[in-house]
Image (cartoon, rainbow, N blue to C red):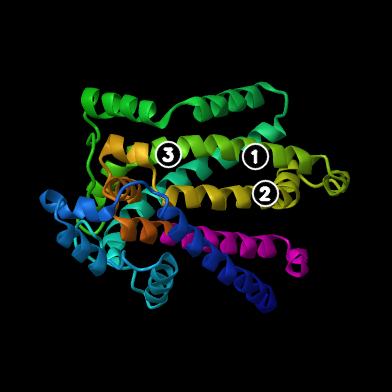
Amino acid sequence: MAGFLIRRVGQIIPTLLFVSLLIFGLQQLMPGDPALILAGEERGDPLVLAQIRAELNLDRPLHEQYVLWLFNVLQGDLGFSWRIREPVAKVILEKLPVTVQLGLMAFAIACLIGIPAGIISAVKKDRPADWVANGVALAGISTPNFWLGIMMILLFSVNLGWLPPSGYVALTVDWRQSLATTIMPAFVLGTGIAAVLMRHTRSAMVQAMNQDYVRTARAKGLAERIVVAKHALRNALVPVITLGALELGTLLSGAVLTEQVFTIPGFGKLVVDAVFNRDYPVVQGVVLVVAVIYVLLNLAADVLYVLINPRLRHA
């Protein structure tokens, strides 16, 4: 296992360096001059613009800007927000718990719905349960998040009065109110991912159920639930884990529309505001953090592969 982890970590380092280069390079393609935005009413004064560019190192060549930024990042310094004049790391740490809570809740809902539905659909292939599961999955994939969010607000907040329509309360302040403010957006995000997980789980399970080792297990007289849970599901989980890691990374990168509908102050809203205000350090910091999250989730998926199937250690 140690050698396996060393190989995977060795692949992560050049990947992150390449990602950092892409983040910085693509950021420069955004139209507009940050100095003009920051200058405000004094944007017509060349001296003010020159001073702002000098303070932000915008007057240096791009390669020098990148090396300086990367050097600071390696020391844990993501820079300062040009708009709110606060450290980017502080801004991210304020928004990260919101996005992590919402993402984990949505992912838990997706797994609780999608994986069991996929297993049942595969076991009951071409039966009414399979048709119902596929129909619900198709509806989940096709339904826009913003529409479902608005309908849930109308039902559970306006008509029934069970849940608050918007806003966010931190877990450390009031965990009950926090769950009440995040359960609807988490369900909205989770349903779409549940549909995708259901389809992939069903496909992997159908393929596994047709393998020789499953037929052998049945020939030995094992109970069907043991054949499904111990033999078929264990081998079918590998592609599902891959998909789950990617979908969780997507959730943790922020859900712009859902956060806007429910007024959730997460990564999605932070990135949108930073892009509109040409706040490059915030955009670069958030995208870099999201990239690290994706890489770590893929590493976690690799470890789960090995735990499920030890033969993959030498792959």
53 sits to left or right of 15: left
Q: In the picture, residue 69 is in which quadrant?
A: bottom left
The residue that disc 2 covers is 239
Furthest residue in direction front, as rendered: 46
- In the rendered image, the vertical position of residue 136 relative to residue 67, given as above or below: above
The residue that disc 3 covers is 189
Depth check: 33 or 127 in front? 33
Q: Is residue 147 visible?
A: yes
Q: Residue at 77% of width from left, 40% of height from top?
A: 207
Q: Are marks 1 and 2 in contact (CB under 8 Å)?
A: yes
The stretch of residues the image draws in magenta is 288-315
The residue carrying pointer 1 sits among few (fewer than 14), some (14 to 19) or many (20 or more) residues within 10 Å by Cα, namely: many
Q: Are marks 3 and 1 in contact (CB under 8 Å)?
A: no
Amino acid residing under circle 1: His
The residue carrying pointer 3 sits among few (fewer than 14), some (14 to 19) or many (20 or more) residues within 10 Å by Cα, namely: many
Q: Tag 3's secondary structure?
A: helix
144 sits to left or right of 177: right
83 sits to left or right of 59: left
Q: Earlier in the sequence, mark 3 or mark 1?
A: 3
Q: Residue at 70% of width from left, 37% of height from top?
A: 203
Residue 120 in percent (x, y) is at 64, 35
Q: Of the numbered discs in the image, which one, if any, rests on residue 200?
A: 1
Q: Earlier in the sequence, mark 1 or mark 2?
A: 1
